[in-house]
Image: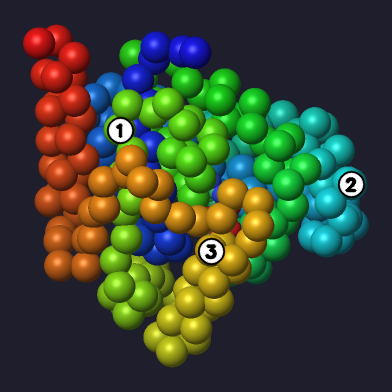
Amino acid sequence: MSTVPVIAIDGPSASGKGTVAQRVAQALGFHYLDSGALYRIVALAAKRAGISWQDEAALADLVSTLDIRFEHGEIYVNGEQVSDAVRSEEMSRGASEVAVHPKVRQALLEVQRAFRKAPGLVADGRDMGSVVFPDAQIKVFLTARSHVRAERRYKQLMEKGIHANLAQILADIEARDARDMQRSAAPLQQCSDATLLDTSDMTIAQAVDGVLALYRRHSRGISK
Ligand code: C5P
């Protein structure tokens, strides 16, 4: 097993875990893995190749043909920049549909583990602590009440000048939560060894400090 430290941050959609994970990675000088982007990439590549999001075998084969790179905050697949394309609401839904297939999850396992490089990794997703990095030094389950998550997403979209409907966003978030929690392969769950961080009444900075405090406490424990 690798001794490179991993901070696993799992949680539901729009919980702010991506932002928190990136800032923690920046503060520690660690690498960052946005595992949700991988499922979004599979959904996008499948759509373009005419492969159904229900075709488990074809989706799993497709993964091996994808050259995926994260560079300077952008996502490239087979040389093409797809950062915005994978962020659409359609690909949010597609990602959660392709993510139910065990063969797709298996095909992405090694892709994800390859991100574990010195001096350390902060990984965010749904099964970072439970399946991909079960030996992670720190496991956090980061969540917020669904209404708070919907309002945050709504504000983000409005700030970007994108028209949005709060009730629709809340319904989409709750549908995705249900699909992520109820699937049989690596469902979204709080591991027994994960620390719960409910950010409903916290700022991003407070959530980042919370994770960094956990990591420092862990590092002190090791050096004692
Ligand atoms: O985190 P993000 O919203 O980008 O993830 C998109 C979808 O990918 C999630 O709704 C979930 O179904 C799936 N996913 C997953 N396992 C992960 C990360 C994301 O199943 N580790």
- Note whether residue 147 is visible: yes
> For numbered disc 3, what is the local secondary structure?
helix
> Which residue is rendered at x = 87% and y = 56% of the image?
55
Give the quadrant of residue 136. Answer: top left
Tell me where residue 33 appears, x and y as whole percent. 47, 35
Report the amino acid beneath label 3: Met
Side of 36 where 196 appears, left or right: left
> For numbered disc 1, what is the local secondary structure?
strand
Q: Is mark 1 within 8 Å of ligand 1?
A: no
Tell me where residue 113 appears, x and y as whole percent. 56, 25
Instruction: Please tell me how crowded label 2 is: few (under 14), some (14-19), or many (20+) other residues with Cα within 10 Å.
Output: some
- Note whether residue 73 is visible: no
Q: CA distance from mark 2 to mark 1?
A: 35 Å
Report the amino acid beneath label 1: Ile
Q: Which residue is mark 1?
A: 138
> Which residue is rendered at x = 35% and y = 20% of the image?
5
Contact between marks 3 and 2 (CB within 8 A): the answer is no
- Mark 3 or mark 1, earlier in chain: 1
Tell me where residue 66 appears, x and y as whole percent. 76, 34
- Mark 3 or mark 2, earlier in chain: 2
- The answer to whether 118 is drawn above or below residue 149 in the figure is above
Q: Which residue is mark 2?
A: 58
Q: CA distance from mark 3 to mark 2?
A: 24 Å
- Mark 2 or mark 1, earlier in chain: 2
> For numbered disc 2, what is the local secondary structure?
helix
> Which residue is rendered at x = 48% and y = 41% of the image?
130
Tell me where residue 94 appears, x and y as whole percent. 68, 62
Give the quadrant of residue 209. Answer: top left
- The answer to whether 8 is drawn above or below residue 137 in the figure is below
Contact between marks 3 and 1 (CB within 8 A): the answer is no
> Which residue is rendered at x = 50% and y = 83% of the image?
171
Q: Which residue is mark 3?
A: 181
